[in-house]
Amino acid sequence: MKNKTYFNWSTGKDSSLALYYAQKNPSFSIDLLVTSVNAHHNRVSMHGLRRELLEIQTQSIGLPLTTIDLPESPTMKTYNEEMTAVVEALVEAKFTDCIFGDIFLEDLRSYREEQLTPFDIKSHFPLWKRNTSELIQDFIKLGFKAIVLSLNSSLLDQSFLGRVIDQDFINDLPENVDPCGENGEFHTFCFDGPIFNTPIEFTKGEKVFKEYKSPTKDSTKNIGFWFLDLIPK
């Protein structure tokens, strides 16, 4: 019997590749995608993707979507409360397992597992500890297509924004940038590949630069991010 499973969907390449592998695992019945959304701006948290494109993307995948709607600048307490409310509803709906696309961030994995253990939800990580250089090659060879829609300006210059993930993109990355952007160097929107029934069509909008307070307590420097607005066709 397959385990009733929900997938923590971020809209990008790592999520897409993890979902691809998870759907081939006979242990899981993946019945739902769950995504955190900044309700104030109506965009996917961190990625800045419009909710409308998220919905078009998940419709192409063919799975229902549940969103965790967060305020503009949620505290950790608020985030945990909203997450708990959604997870409680998922437990009521008989979900027993969940899947993440994380690759090697130990603290993040531990946090996820600690939050879900009280609900008896088992966490799974199909990409865990895999070589990121090999993963990005798998992503390309499988026919996935993704575009960079946000990046950390201290690690990548603006020219990388709006580029499609291909071999030239990988070759151009600085040596200190992970090829999968696993350290938060860049985020992507996946718009085509084997998990989609049809490609997602969009046009490129404006580029926006924003600064955020550093999450490190001993740092007074702000962190700058470039965002590219993608507009549904």
Image: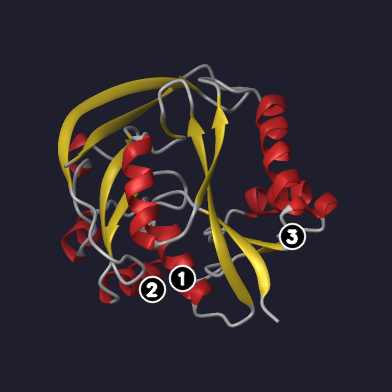
Q: Residues within 10 Å of mark 1 (few under 14, many from 20)?
A: few
Question: What residue is shown at x 46% (from left), y 59% (from top)?
Answer: 63
Question: What residue is shown at x 59% (from left), y 53% (from top)?
Answer: 105
Question: Which image quadrant is residue 5 in?
Answer: bottom right
Label 2, on which residue?
134
Label 1, on which residue?
131
**Toward the viewer: 219 or 43?**
43
User: Could you say where residue 227 lies in the image, as x and y percent from the top left?
Assistant: 29, 32
Question: What residue is shown at x 60% (from left), y 72% (from top)?
Answer: 29
User: Could you say where residue 148 lies in the image, as x and y percent from the top left?
Assistant: 27, 46
Amino acid type shown at disc 2: Glu
Label 3, on which residue?
94
Q: CA distance from mark 3 to mark 1?
A: 34 Å
Q: Secondary structure at mark 2?
A: helix
Q: Secondary structure at mark 3?
A: loop
**Toward the viewer: 188 or 39?**
39
Amino acid type shown at disc 1: Asn
User: Which-is-in-front pick, marks 2 and 3?
Assistant: 3
User: Which-is-in-front pick, marks 3 and 1?
Assistant: 3
Question: Dots 1 and 2: beta carbons under 8 Å?
Answer: yes
**Toward the viewer: 13 or 183?**
13
Residue 187 seen: no
Q: Is residue 97 left or right of residue 23?
A: right
Amino acid type shown at disc 3: Lys
Farthest-out residue, right: 118
